[in-house]
Image (cartoon, rainbow, N blue to C red):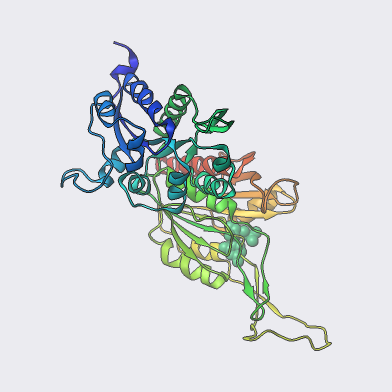
Amino acid sequence: MAANTVREKKLVILGVTASIAAHRALDLIRLLKAGNYDVKVVATENALHFFPKETAEVFSGNTLETSAYGLGPRVSHVEWAQGASAVLIAPASADFIAKMALGLADDLLSTICLASSARILFAPAMEERMYTHPATRAHLSTLKSWNVQEIPPETGSLASGRSGIGRMAGVETIYAALQKSIEASSSDSRDLLGKKVLISAGPTFEPIDQVRFIGNRSSGKMGYALAEAAIRRGAAVTVVSGPVSLIPPSGANMICVETAREMQDALSIHFHSADILIMAAAVSDYTTENSFSQKKKKDGQDWHLHLKENPDILATLAKSRRPGQTIMGFAAETSLVKKDLQDKLLRKGVDLLAANNISEAGSGFGSDNNTISLIDHDDSLSEEKSGKKKDLADWLIDKILLHRARSLTQ
Ligand code: C5P
């Protein structure tokens, strides 16, 4: 027996929307069945103008559904959405892409897309003008930011008889993309399942008056990447975030704060139940003694601000840690001297310190990349690594888990 017929059947929900390319979804069903996938076809009402319902049912071996109503008490869109390894929409019309990007759920397929935690892939099929329209471009980029995967269309002859981009990708290409995605997600490790991870991210803003503040250049990207990685790996994640302009990590318990004091209050509430604290926020070291409740007007005089030191949130939390908790701090430095970092590791009372040199070009604040020097107390996990913040996030979580595993055996 061939190896791929031995593995347990995985469910793929094949969504079919209204496009002349819908008939090619029949070939997809056959490919999926040949690859030992269980296939349930969910079509939009209008897709049935182009798609033969009965043929799809014979090929898939399952009834084709269009509506969430009348499915009976046993099966619900939520069950389908949760039980699937992937949701594949092929062809995906411009209208359906817009619905997904807006989070609309007015039929079975769009409801499944919203309720599913499975990977969602879609193969657009439409006229070139529709595909290149700014509205479609904006929707595609929204979906991309949520990790919804586009299988891009090809250039070729379109339903209108014109030639251009918008022809649905070949079914073999779509099938290969789906398989790759399912394999990648099943190799994703859920090694943080059952763990509570508390992450601080972004800057803090300390008010001077109603319009001015003391802040810093932290974008929050590293903290958010850590939150996304921890969620993907199964953790229950709380993010305490300073003001940033990033899309919140999907699935995180988000607490938005402005000042260091507010960040400290929020972290203190969640720290005791957390297994892991990652303090990636760039907390302002100083705050104003008193902020003005109105905007301070110019008066021809110099203005001397008196700043006082903020509490060191990390060091304070670390002092109240309970056994079994792991704490990682961050350090943004303009030069990395190992002795200084070791002193900071001790001073803060953390297990691991991730330091980055913010004066390095293309790295650090605001960038998608970073170079991190990681140190721990016995130097057994110390290492330097450069890369995308998303990849470094997984690497840092690997280090935290290694630290935890070693602490358990000591
Ligand atoms: O002392 P320094 O600012 O370099 O320390 C950096 C680490 O300490 C970061 O993890 C940061 O989030 C945390 N920190 C803090 N409270 C402060 C300043 C920094 O928790 N007031």
> Foreground: 180 or 394?
180
**Quadrant hosting residue 65:** top left
Residue at 68% from the left image edge and 50% from the top image edge = 364
Q: Which image quarter holds the C terminus? A: top left
Q: Is residue 176 above or below residue 295?
A: above
Q: Is residue 383 left or right of residue 323?
A: right
Q: Is residue 220 above or below residue 377?
A: below
| Residue 188 appears in the figure | no
> Foreground: 389 or 400?
389
| Residue 226 appears in the figure | yes
Q: Where is residue 83 in the image (x, y as percent from the top left)?
A: 29, 39
Residue at 37% from the left image edge and 40% from the top image edge = 118
Q: In this view, does 165 lie to the left or right of 10?
A: right
> Foreground: 10 or 185?
10
Q: Where is residue 67 in the image (x, y as percent from the top left)?
A: 26, 45
**Image quarter where ligand 1 lies:** bottom right
Q: Position of residue 267 (x, y in %)?
A: 47, 64
Q: Where is residue 328 in the image (x, y as percent from the top left)?
A: 53, 52
